Image: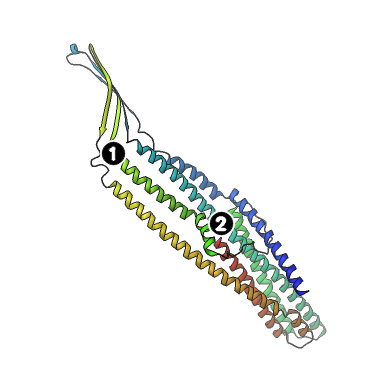
C-alpha cells in the first residue's frame, strides 16, 4: 500500500511538472512576441545587415566635363568629356561579399544571444513564482493552524481555563505568520510585475506551485557538445575566425594592382579626339602591414575562442556537479521532512495539556523552518538546472 501511494504521488508530481513546463513554454512564447526590447533588437539587426552590405560593390564612376574658351578667339573653344570607372582586383569583391554574409550571420547570433538571455530571465522568474506560490500554500496551512489555536485559547480564556499570557502568545504567533504571508504575497506581485514588464506591459497569469520538468544530464560530456554548439557566443567566435581568414585573403587581394577604364573625348575647332582610357594603380605604400595585421587579428580571435570555450566548459562542469549535489540535498531534506512531520501529534499533546503553548510553538517552528529550507532548496536546485539549459530550449 505504501509503495502504491508513493507511485501515485510521483505520477502526480510528474503531471504537475509537465503542466508547469507547458505554462512556462506558453509564457516564453508570449514574451518573445510582446517584448519591446526584443522587437527593437530585431529592427536594429535588419539595419546592421543592410550596413554590412554597403561598401562591397564597385566604386562610383566619375564623369568629367571641361569647357575652355580659347585665346585668341581665332583658335576656338575646347570641350572635354570623360567617364572613368575604378575597380579593385576582381577577387576582392568576392571576399568582401563573403565577409558581409558572415557579418550578417553574426548579427543573427547577437540577436539569438539576447533572445536566450531574455528567455533565461523569464524562466528564472517562473521558478521564483513557483517557489512563492508553494510557500504561500505552506503559509496558508500554517495560518489555518494558528487561527485554530487562537480560537481554541480564546474559548479557554473566556471560560477561565487559560490566562491572557497564553492567549497573547497564540495571537503573536498568528500575527507573525500573517505578516510572513503578506510579505510573500507582496513578493509574488513584484515577480508578476517584472514578468508583465518583460511581456510588453501585458499581465501574465501564473498559478503553478510546481517547477518545470528539467532533468540533470547524466552524461555531461555528451550533453556539453549540444550546449557548446547552441551557445551563440561560441558560434559567433567560430564565424569570426572564418571571417578573419577571409579578411586575410581580402587584404592580399587589396595588395594587388587596381585598375581603371573609361572614355575620353576632346573637341577643338576642326578636330575631335575620342577613345578609351586604361589605368593601373601600383600598391606600393598604401596597404603596408595590412596583411600582417589581418593575420595577427586571426591569431587573436583563435586565442579568444579557445579561452571562451574553456571558460564555458569549466563553468558548466561546475554547475553540473553543483546540480547533482543540490539534488541529493533536496532528496535528503524531503525524506527527512516526511519522517518528522509531528504537527498532528504536537497539537494532540497541546490539547491534552502534555506540553505548553510555548513548547508547541517552538517545536512547530522548527518543523516550519525545515519545510521552508526544503522549499528554498528546491527553488535553488531548479535555478541551477535552468542555468545548464540556458542555450537549450
Q: Quadrant of the N terminus?
A: bottom right
Camera-nearest residue between 257 and 79? 257
The residue wearing badge 2 is: 392
Observer-side mark, 1 or 2, equals: 1
- Image mark for residue 256: 1
The picture places residue 104, in percent across and down from the top left corner, at: 46, 44
- How many labels sit on residues? 2
Residue 201 visible somewhere in the drawing: no
Local packing at callout 1 (Cα closer than 10 Å; few below 14, some 14-19, many 20+) is: some
The picture places residue 354, in percent across and down from the top left corner, at: 76, 88
Q: Quadrant of the C terminus?
A: bottom right
The picture places residue 244, in percent across and down from the top left corner, at: 38, 48
Residue that protrudes farthest toward the right in the picture? 159
Q: Quadrant of residue 160?
A: bottom right
Residue 183 visible somewhere in the drawing: yes
Is residue 285 shown above or below 346? Answer: above
Local packing at callout 2 (Cα closer than 10 Å; few below 14, some 14-19, many 20+) is: some
- 339 lies left or right of 89: right
Q: Kindly identify the residue that appears in the image at 62 percent across and 72 percent down.
A: 330
- 315 lies left or right of 171: left
| Callout 2 secondary element | loop
Residue that protrudes farthest toward the left in the picture? 72
3D distance between C-alphas at marks 1 and 2: 46 Å
Amino acid at each position: 500500500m505504501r509503495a502504491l501511494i508513493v507511485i501515485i504521488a510521483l505520477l502526480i508530481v510528474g503531471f504537475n511538472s509537465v503542466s508547469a513546463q507547458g505554462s512556462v513554454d506558453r509564457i516564453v512564447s508570449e514574451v518573445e512576441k510582446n517584448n519591446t526590447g526584443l522587437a527593437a533588437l530585431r529592427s536594429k539587426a535588419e539595419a546592421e545587415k543592410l550596413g554590412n552590405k554597403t561598401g562591397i560593390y564597385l566604386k562610383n564612376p566619375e564623369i568629367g566635363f571641361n569647357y575652355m574658351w580659347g585665346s585668341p578667339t581665332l583658335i576656338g573653344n575646347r570641350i572635354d568629356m570623360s567617364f572613368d570607372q575604378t575597380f579593385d582586383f576582381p577577387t576582392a569583391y568576392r571576399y568582401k561579399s563573403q565577409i558581409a554574409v558572415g557579418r550578417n550571420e553574426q548579427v543573427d547570433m547577437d540577436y539569438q544571444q539576447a533572445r536566450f538571455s531574455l528567455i533565461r530571465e523569464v524562466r528564472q522568474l517562473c521558478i521564483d513564482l513557483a517557489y512563492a506560490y508553494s510557500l504561500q500554500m505552506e503559509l496558508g496551512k500554517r495560518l489555518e493552524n494558528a487561527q485554530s489555536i487562537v480560537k481554541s485559547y480564546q474559548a479557554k480564556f473566556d471560560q477561565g481555563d487559560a490566562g491572557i499570557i497564553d492567549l497573547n502568545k497564540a495571537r503573536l504567533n498568528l500575527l507573525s505568520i500573517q505578516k510572513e504571508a503578506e510579505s510573500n504575497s507582496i513578493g509574488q506581485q513584484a515577480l508578476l510585475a517584472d514578468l508583465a514588464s518583460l511581456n510588453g506591459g501585458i499581465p501574465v497569469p501564473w498559478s503553478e506551485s510546481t517547477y518545470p520538468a528539467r532533468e540533470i544530464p547524466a552524461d555531461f560530456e555528451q550533453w556539453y557538445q549540444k550546449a557548446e554548439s547552441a551557445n551563440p557566443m561560441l558560434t559567433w567566435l567560430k564565424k569570426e575566425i572564418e571571417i578573419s581568414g577571409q579578411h586575410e585573403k581580402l587584404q592580399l587581394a587589396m595588395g594587388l594592382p587596381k585598375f581603371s577604364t573609361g572614355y575620353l573625348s576632346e573637341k577643338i575647332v576642326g578636330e575631335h579626339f575620342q577613345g578609351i582610357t586604361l589605368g593601373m594603380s601600383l600598391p606600393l605604400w598604401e596597404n603596408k602591414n595590412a596583411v600582417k595585421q589581418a593575420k595577427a587579428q586571426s591569431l587573436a580571435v583563435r586565442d579568444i575562442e579557445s579561452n571562451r570555450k574553456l571558460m564555458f566548459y569549466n563553468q558548466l562542469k561546475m554547475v553540473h556537479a553543483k546540480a547533482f549535489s543540490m539534488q541529493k540535498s533536496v532528496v535528503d531534506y524531503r525524506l527527512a521532512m516526511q519522517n518528522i512531520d509531528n504537527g498532528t501529534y504536537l497539537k494532540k499533546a497541546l490539547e491534552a495539556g502534555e506540553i505548553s503553548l510555548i513548547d508547541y510553538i517552538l517545536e512547530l517552528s522548527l518543523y516550519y523552518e525545515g519545510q521552508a529550507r526544503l522549499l528554498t532548496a528546491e527553488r535553488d536546485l531548479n535555478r541551477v538546472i535552468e542555468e545548464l539549459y540556458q542555450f537549450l530550449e
